[in-house]
Amino acid sequence: MKPARSKLASYDELLRTLRKRRWTFVEIAQALEREFSLRVNPKTIWAYLQVSRDAEPPVEPAKEIADQPLLEQRPKRRFKLDA
């Protein structure tokens, strides 16, 4: 029997890229729902990244992620902290 795979496995590279760019888990969850109609709790994203950090190498990203228009559409923050 094969082990269960997370629905986030095909978005692994995108998730890691967004976290490196300092996106919050809430922002990532909102972007996944908006762009890919994938509803995910922010805690699920956090848990996936924690577990997959030590697991096998990432799987091939989904084809629709290749152009990554999502990276340019970061939600605006309410407060400006760069003073």
Image (tube, grey):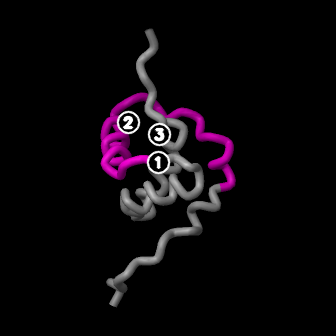
Residue 52: percent from left, percent from top: 38, 36
Residue matched to label 1? 39
| Magenta region, residue range | 39-67
- Identified by mark 1, the residue type is Arg
- Spatial CA distance of label 2 from label 3 is 10 Å
Residue 15 drawn above or below residue 4: below
Indicate the quadrant containing the C terminus: top left, top right, bottom left or bottom right: bottom left
The residue singled out by tag 3 in the image is 8
Using a 10 Å C-alpha cutoff, classify the residue at mark 3 as few (fewer than 14 neighbours), some (14 to 19) or many (20 or more).
Answer: some
Residue 5 in which image quadrant: top left
Which numbered dot is residue 52? 2
Q: Secondary structure at mark 3?
A: loop
Residue at x 44% of width, y 32% of height:
6
Q: Is residue 48 magenta?
A: yes
Q: Is residue 40 above or below residue 5?
A: below
Locate residue 44 relative to residue 67 in the image: left or right: left
Element at badge 2?
Answer: helix
Marks 2,1: beta carbons within 8 A:
no
Q: Residues within 10 Å of mark 1 (few under 14, many from 20)?
A: few
- The residue drawn where x is 41% and y is 18% is 3
